[in-house]
Amino acid sequence: GDPTKAKTLYQRALDGATDFNAVKSLLDAAKSIGETSFMQAVLKKGGELATATEQFIDLARGLKSTGDSAGAATLMDQAENAVASLDEMQKVVDAAKSDFADDAARVQRVQAKFDKRAANQAKYVEFGKQEDLADTPKKLFALTDQVMIELEDPFYAAKLLGKVETLLNEGAYQFQRARPLILAVDKHLNDTHWLSRLLDEAAAKSGDFTQFKDVIRTAASEMKNKEFGREKARAYLQQREAGLQSNPNAGVYDYTKLAQVALSDLKDSAWASNILGSAKSAAKDHYALAHIGGIMAQGGDMAGAETMFMQAAQTCGNAEGCIQLATRLKGYGLDASLVRKVYEACGATLSNAADKLRWVEGIVDELKDKAWASEAYAAIEGQFSGDAKLRFDVSRMNRVGDEFYPYRKHAA
């Protein structure tokens, strides 16, 4: 006669329940309490411990009777996933039609599952045996492919891929482990809700930029649903860009890395150019300026790239910087005439005679142009005398001796 104390004891029993039968024994007790919230708690706990299709169906019916339609729908989903035979599939269909007739999508889905299973019962039995033995993501992926090839059953494929996700969740998150699941869901199911959750998690957990870039490339370039993947990739890039703009410590290379991804994976040169606008304001040396120019050239903006290279030339400060700049521009695969133009502009900033000599040596050492170097040696020769002149002569002899002393060509 004391329902309050009884509920306390029943709650303790429920908290300690470790198998479905223990929870089931509490159902009548829960009804006697007459409290909807406690009845729902018992039924939901049963859902955590149930393993068989009929158990999930009974719990779903009970939960729906308490007014929790959403919870009941979840239990019916579990009943579908637990199906191991045609008879069990029939029970799910009957329950859907009798107790969940208001859910037309469910009724249609489970009927399609039943029809598919009835027409291919032997194969389902065989696949069920393989499923029981598939204890790794690799095995489940292979089985999913086989199911789709032989049965074209996306519902069964979804069940198998759900098992993959459960296995992946048991360990520390790694995108390279999650990536095959994303691609499999995309390939076999095109379930954008599931894909959004998987991709959002991947983007949120990408620790460094290399991992983030892998997520973007997967979404933008590798998915079957190209439009959806590109939309997700764009959203993640926009979030990362906003984060940089609000971060006073963001550096030039943070922006250039983002611009490169926008260009290479989304093929959006206009957006990349806008991002590089933020990078320009942070660029202070020839390395950064040349890097920005290289990305602009990659995106087809040669005029903007040349402007950045010329700015880089003005910041080198010495001959070694000019040579480093020329080396970098050659690495970008730029036209030789542009590299020469930038190198000449860099040389024009030098005032020290020794620096100018080193700059001329760079014409041979890096640009491999002896004819131009011979002219450049002649242009600065008058700036040397004494020991410096000896150094100059040795440099010219070693690098352009054949050009400066034509008779050596004939002797050779």
Image: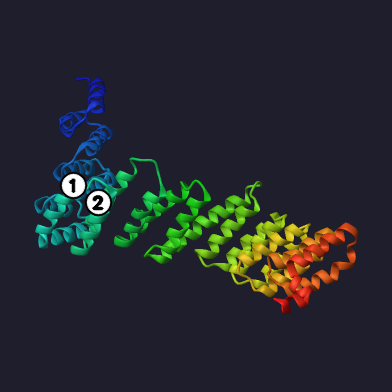
The residue pinned by badge 2 equals: 139
Query: Is residue 327 left or right of 354 when viewed as pictured?
Result: left
* Image quadrant occupied by the C terminus: bottom right
The answer to whether the residues at label 1 and label 2 have Cβ atoms under 8 Å apart is yes
The residue lying toward the viewer, choosing from 280 and 380, is: 380
The residue shown at (38%, 53%) is 179
The residue carrying mark 1 is 133
Residues under labels 1 and 2: Cα distance?
Answer: 9 Å
User: Residue 343: x percent and y percent?
Assistant: 74, 67
Q: Is residue 351 visible?
A: no
Q: Secondary structure at mark 2?
A: helix
User: Which residue type carries mark 1?
Assistant: Leu
> Residue 50: where, in percent of width, then height?
19, 39
- Answer above or below: position of 40 versus 318: above
Q: Is residue 57 left or right of residue 195?
A: left
Q: Quadrant of residue 360?
A: bottom right
Crowding near the residue tagged with mark 2, few <14, some 14–19, many ≥20 C-alpha atoms within 10 Å: some
Quarter of the image for residue 280 reads bottom right
Residue 162 position, x and y percent, is 28, 50
- Residue placed most toward the observer, 407 or 319: 407
Residue at 88% x, 62% y: name it: 384
